[in-house]
Image (spheres, rainbow, N blue to C red):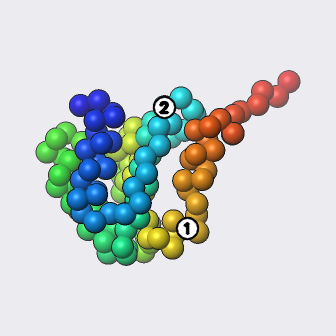
């Protein structure tokens, strides 16, 4: 599976598990930690934790490697190497506005400037 197919599978699966406001960002052409980022609103922190467990059950048999999972009460980050998944409560998502940053990044707003 290529990266776009993997992202589509993840998005479809999260949607089937009642995740909300799912957005994906293609960052392949910018300098960022991952090539794709998926942001998802979870109903609660417990819902986000359950989504992580469900994703592991669904994706590990397909060869997906979970490099790291970082959990807090209102935000879970899953590192798949070239894909990052952010599972956030609606309050956390509103507070951090991560999608605004990623949109600006993908639009080239934060290009590095050479110092001479």
Image quadrant holding the N terminus, namely top left
Residue depicted at x 58% and y 69%: 95
Q: Which residue is the site of mark 2?
A: 28
Residue ranking furthest to the right:
116
Image quadrant holding the C terminus, namely top right
Residue depicted at x 82% and y 28%: 115
- Relative to residue 61, is residue 43 depicted above or below? below
Q: Position of residue 6 (x, y in %)?
A: 28, 39
Q: Which residue is the site of mark 1?
A: 94
Q: Position of residue 39 (x, y in %)?
A: 43, 55
Quadrant of the image occupied by residue 30 = top right
Q: Secondary structure at mark 1?
A: helix
Please report whichever mark, 2 or 1, sits nearer to the chain's N-terminal start. 2
Q: Is residue 20 left or right of residue 61?
A: right
Whether residue 70 is visible: no
- Relative to residue 76, is residue 68 depicted above or below? above
- Relative to residue 80, is residue 69 depicted above or below? below
- Relative to residue 58, is residue 96 depicted above or below? below
CA gap between label 2 and label 1 equals 25 Å
Q: Is residue 75 left or right of residue 51?
A: right
């Amino acid at each position: 599976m290529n990266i776009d197919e993997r992202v589509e599978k993840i998005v479809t699966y999260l949607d089937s598990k009642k995740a909300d406001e799912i957005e994906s960002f293609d960052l392949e052409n910018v300098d960022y930690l991952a090539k794709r980022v998926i942001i998802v609103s979870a109903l609660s922190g417990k819902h986000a934790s359950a989504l992580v467990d469900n994703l592991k059950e669904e994706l590990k048999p397909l060869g997906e490697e979970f490099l790291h999972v970082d959990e807090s009460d209102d935000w879970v980050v899953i590192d798949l190497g070239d894909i990052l998944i952010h599972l956030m409560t609606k309050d956390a998502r509103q507070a951090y506005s991560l999608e605004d940053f990623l949109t600006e990044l993908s639009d080239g707003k934060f290009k590095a400037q050479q110092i001479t």
